[in-house]
């Protein structure tokens, strides 16, 4: 996924999470509530597409790694048989062609490994009668070929499906542009109805809308970093999408799927942070010291709201 899209999706989620904590302010105003409901639907559609792309990439990478290792092991075994036979008949040219370590096989470029595997398969086929004492029969060669084909299919898949990926990326780009336009021209404008009566909420909404990269915008070069993890106090499980605010600054970030967050470029000082998410009590952590060129780590445990 493009970095620009990741940044925009993070901002969309931040806006959605912050507004969800303040539905009591939004819901009494039918027009605003209707726009916010539309926004949630649009963002959820984008999140589903983005998540599918992420899982597909991870799945393909893992499948490729597994298939490559399987093929490399099959080559190692077959090459051992071939080398044993050809050494016994003093044919060292074939022996040397087969004499490649497993680590080198695993480190080969995909197409080079495929080419080498095809060579091994050809030798297995051409010299099958001589290799029969090592249990090299038609079934053995077919099984080797199946492992070669499985890896070849995975390597070829990205090329075959490139147009589909481009179409999916284009769809994600288009939907993100649509949401950005919707925010700028509709929801942002409608939020002005709360600017006078709920100035704190409105200012935080503006902060959430403006976040692209984590961190406080400033001109100082000597800064520190705050890293943390948000967990459930009862279960010790991590909490994703919690809002972390540095009080009295424009900084608003979300915890990720691992409950973790990082805020960079923080001027040295002592800060208070507020952590909030639905179904948990808000928590304020005071007097967090940020020092120049240092990383401060915090663990924040939230208390579930009683039913």
Image (cartoon, rainbow, N blue to C red):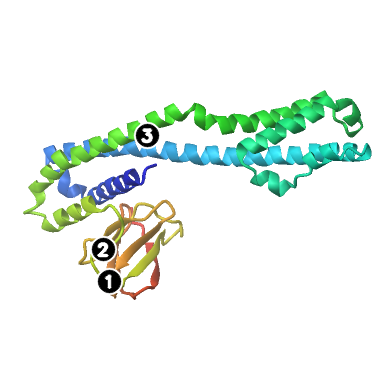
Reading the image, the residue beneath label 2 is: 216
**What percent of the width, then of the height, locates residue 178?**
24, 35
Q: Which of marks 1 and 2 precedes in the sequence?
A: 2
Quadrant where the N terminus is found in the figure: top left
Q: Label 1's element?
A: loop
Which residue is labeled 3 in the image? 169
Viewer-proximal residue among 258 and 185: 185
Q: Nearer the viewer, residue 242 or 48?
A: 48
In this rendering, position of residue 14 left or right of residue 258? left
Whether residue 282 appears in this view of the structure is no
SS assignment at label 3: helix
The residue carrying pointer 3 sits among few (fewer than 14), some (14 to 19) or many (20 or more) residues within 10 Å by Cα, namely some
Q: Looking at the image, can residue 295 be seen?
A: yes
Which residue is pictured at 21% across the width and 61% down the height? 250
Identify the mark at residue 94; answer none if there is no mark. none
Q: Where is residue 7 in the image (x, y as percent from the top left)?
A: 32, 48
Structural crowding at the residue carrying mark 1, measured as other residues with C-alpha within 10 Å and reported as few (<14), some (14–19) or many (≥20): many
Label 2 element class: loop
Q: Distance between the residues labelled 3 and 2?
A: 30 Å
Q: Is residue 76 left or right of residue 87?
A: left
Q: Residue at x 73, y 41 (%)?
A: 73
The earlier-in-sequence mark between 3 and 1 is: 3
Tell me the tag on residue 267.
1
Q: Earlier in the sequence, mark 3 or mark 2?
A: 3
- Are the two marked residues, 2 and 1, in contact with CB atoms closer than 8 angstroms? yes
Residue at 92% across / 39% down in the picture? 90
Query: Looking at the image, is 233 positioned above or below residue 278?
Result: below
Q: Which residue is drawn at 83% across and 38% down?
A: 93
């Amino acid at each position: 996924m493009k970095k620009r899209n990741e940044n925009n999706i993070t901002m969309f989620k931040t806006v959605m999470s912050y507004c969800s904590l303040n539905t009591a302010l939004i819901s009494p105003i039918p027009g605003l509530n209707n726009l916010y409901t539309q926004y949630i639907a649009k963002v959820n559609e984008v999140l589903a597409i983005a998540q599918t792309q992420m899982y597909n990439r991870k799945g393909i990478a893992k499948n490729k790694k597994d298939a490559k290792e399987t093929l490399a092991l099959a080559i190692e075994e077959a090459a051992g048989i071939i080398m044993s036979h050809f050494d016994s008949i003093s044919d060292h040219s074939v022996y040397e062609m087969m004499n490649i370590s497993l680590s080198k096989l695993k480190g080969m470029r995909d197409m080079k490994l495929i080419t080498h595997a095809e060579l091994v398969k050809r030798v297995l086929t051409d010299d099958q009668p001589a290799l029969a004492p090592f249990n090299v029969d038609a079934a053995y060669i077919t099984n080797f070929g199946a492992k070669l084909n499985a890896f070849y299919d995975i390597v070829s898949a990205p090329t075959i499906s490139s147009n589909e990926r481009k179409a999916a990326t284009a769809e994600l780009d288009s939907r993100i542009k649509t949401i950005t336009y919707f925010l700028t021209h509709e929801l942002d404008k409608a939020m002005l109805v709360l600017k006078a009566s709920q100035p704190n909420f409105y200012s935080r909404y503006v902060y959430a809308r403006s976040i692209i990269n984590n961190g406080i915008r400033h001109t100082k070069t000597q800064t520190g970093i705050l890293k943390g993890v948000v967990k459930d106090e009862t279960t010790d499980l991590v909490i994703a999408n919690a809002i972390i605010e540095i009080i009295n600054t424009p900084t608003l970030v979300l915890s990720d799927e691992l409950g973790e967050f990082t805020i960079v470029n923080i001027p040295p000082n002592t800060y208070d942070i507020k952590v909030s998410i639905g179904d948990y009590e808000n928590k304020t952590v005071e007097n967090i010291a940020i020092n120049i060129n240092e990383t401060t780590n915090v663990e924040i445990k939230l208390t579930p709201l009683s039913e």
